[in-house]
Every structure is written in C-alpha cells, then in structure tokens.
Amino acid sequence: MAGFENQKIIWNLVTFEKSLILDDDFLEPSLQRKMFSQRMFSDIMRNTFPSLDYCIKLLPRGTDAFIQFIDILIEIKQKDALVLLLTPT
C-alpha cells in the first residue's frame, strides 16, 4: 500500500509542478510580499523544475509564507494549482 501512496504523491507533485505558473504575474506579488528576493527568485527559475523548487524553498518559511502563497494564487487566478494544492489526496 505504501508504494501506491508514494506513487500518488509523486504524481500529484508532477501535476502540481506543471500547473503552477511562475511568471511575472506571480513574481510581482511575491516580491511585494517579500517572500523571496529577486536573486532567490532568479535562482529558482534557473532550476529544472522551478515550481517544485519554489515550493521546497517556501516550506521552511512557515505558515505565514504558505498563506501568502495561497493568497497570490487566488489573486492571479491560478485555479488549477489551487485545486491541486488544497484537495486532499
């Protein structure tokens, strides 16, 4: 059963990575809220999987950063990413 659950988690991460769009619409509010600096965001964008890297770097920033992340997704209307993120697996 654990193998199936691990596959499902990986599949959800891959799907989420494809759904999250890190573009200028996302960058501007992210910088305004000081979630990451311009340099950190540039480093994230150079990564092979920037959306996943963004989320990994967001995790240790705590609950407030996660709430701000959700607020940005709502603000810029990234509904697909929100549904994947907030739907229990």
Image (spheres, rainbow, N blue to C red):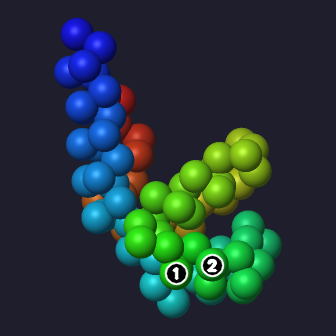
Looking at the image, do the residues carrying marks 2 and 1 touch, with CB atoms under 8 Å apart? yes
Q: Quadrant of the C terminus?
A: top left
- Count of numbered marks: 2
> Toward the viewer: 41 or 26?
41
Q: Residues within 10 Å of mark 2 (few under 14, many from 20)?
A: few
Which residue, given by chain and number where applicable, does mark 2 sit on? 43
Q: Residue at x 41, y 41 (%)?
A: 86
Residue 17 is left or right of residue 57, and the answer is left
Q: Distance of mark 2 from mark 1, alpha carbons? A: 5 Å
Quick one: SS at disc 2? helix
Frontmost residue, 50 versus 73: 50
Image quarter (top left, top right, bottom left or bottom right) of the N terminus:
top left
Vertical arrangement, residue 87 with respect to residue 37, above or below? above
**What residue do we see at 29% from left, 52% from top?**
14
Residue 33 appears in view: no
Up/down of 27 relative to 79, above or below: below
Q: Residue at x 71, y 54 (%)?
A: 65
- Amino acid type at mark 1: Arg
Residue that badge 1 annotates:
46
Kindly state the secondary structure of the residue where label 1 is placed: helix
Dot 2 amino acid type: Asp
Residue 81 shows in this picture? yes
Residue drawn at point x = 73 percent, y = 71 percent? 36
Task: Establish if 88 lies above or below 34.
Answer: above
Which label sits on residue 81? none
Image coordinates for residue 56, horizontal then vertical, percent: 58, 52
Label 1: how many residues lie within 10 Å, few (<14), some (14-19) or many (20+)?
A: few
Is residue 46 toward the left or the right of residue 86 in the image?
right
